[in-house]
Amino acid sequence: MGGVSIPVVVLAGFLGAGKTTVLNHLLRSAADVRLGVVVNDFGAVGVDAMLVSGWADSTVSLENGCLCCSTEDGTVDELLTRLTARRGPDALDAVVVEASGVAEPAAMVRQVLTSTVPGVRYGGLVVVVDGVEFETVRRRHRQLDDHVAMADVVILSKTDLLEEAAVARVTARCRELNGWAPLVPAANGSLDPRLLFEAGPPRTRQLALGEAVPDEAAHLHSFYDAVEFRSPDPLDPRRFTAFLDARPSGVFRVKGPVRFAGADERYLLQTVGAAVRFTRGPWPRGAPRATELVLVGAGLDAPALLADLRACVQTAGEPVDEWAMMAVLRSTEGV
């Protein structure tokens, strides 16, 4: 794993919101990514049977190298230990913890944040919201407002069943509850895995009898934008953390190595929604000591983002503020 920890993403939403559809879509479309999935129980989750190749105790082996574990008591440490014990080519790249429809997301998040399993990190809370039954669910479950408010990413499911005006109303209400988190429409549960973790190109799902059908995820890239930024000169840590705090909600993810002024080590940045995490370590032998970032999102103003990032570059002769790194260190692993 090269010293980089495995992100653990919590996927939450009330019964019927579409979590299972989103989860199955991630499993089908995340090519070149080995996912570990922790669910409350297999019966409730209904992981796509076409993806399941065998059962072993409480672990399901999936056809694309992913694993699925179940837990009935809500604890995740034992399962995270089992999932992250794999090494070499079988090592997992990310873990998704699927909370049951009656689970409290905050409790699941606390378990991940307080986990003592080495080599894992909290990768954010993703809340799936039923676009069709949004107001009905809010009346029945007042906690929905709290769930949306604490989310790092909000997924609006079933938008393919709604008129444009209805999507706009649900989006506006979610934005009132959470003024920062990206709001991502997911027609038919289609979610680009690149929003949550590293992923290769979309894959083709194989049916049970070998018939190949194109996955709708193959066209998802048209909805998302990517902006690349590179600077051989170091960034001012205070200005860069201010940029991260103020980045537009359309920026779903920011990832890549960062070179900071006054720091000899490399800081590998990963953001999911509002969650920001740096991993500190030495620069790989032969790697250029440069900031190389990719910003993924929707409706991005590339010129404005690049201008803001260029403004973070430390100018020649500018004094280094030794306290400026404190904001970075607060979000850095191993400090």
Image (cartoon, helix red, strand yellow):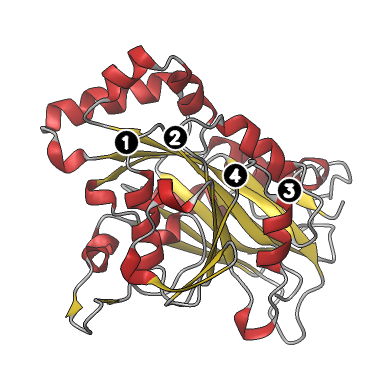
- Mark 4 vs mark 1: which is more N-terminal? 1
- In the image: residue 72, left or right of residue 297: right
- Mark 2 or mark 1: whose residue is earlier in sequence: 1
* Alpha carbons under labels 3 and 1: distance apart: 43 Å
Q: Going by the picture, which residue comes out furthest to the left?
A: 163
Instruction: Name the N-terminal-most of marks 3 and 1.
Output: 1
The CA distance from mark 2 to mark 3 is 40 Å
Estimate how packed mark 3 is, as few (under 14), some (14 to 19) or many (20 or more) residues with alpha carbons within 10 Å. many
For disc 4, the marked residue is 72
Disc 4, SS:
loop
| Marks 2 and 1 in Cβ contact (< 8 Å) | yes
| Amino acid type of the residue tagged 3 in the rendering | Pro
The residues bearing labels 4 and 1 have C-alpha atoms spaced at a distance of 20 Å
Earlier in the chain: of badge 2 and badge 4, it is 4
Label 4 or label 1, whichever lies nearer to me, is: 4
Q: Which of label 4 and label 3 is nearer to you?
A: 4
Q: Which residue is mark 1?
A: 16
Position of the N terminus, as image quadrant, is bottom right
Residue of label 3:
237
Q: Foreground: 289 or 4?
A: 4
* Up-down relation of residue 49 to residue 296 (above or below): below
Residue situated in front as seen by the camera: 311 or 167: 167
What's the amino acid at mark 1?
Gly
Which residue lies at the image location 44% right of the left edge and 55% below the top edge?
A: 195
Q: Earlier in the sequence, mark 4 or mark 3?
A: 4
Distance Cα–Cα, label 2 vs label 4: 13 Å
Q: Amino acid at mark 4?
A: Glu
The residues bearing labels 4 and 3 have C-alpha atoms spaced at a distance of 44 Å
User: Cβ–Cβ below 8 Å for labels 3 and 1?
Assistant: no
> What kind of element bears circle 1?
loop
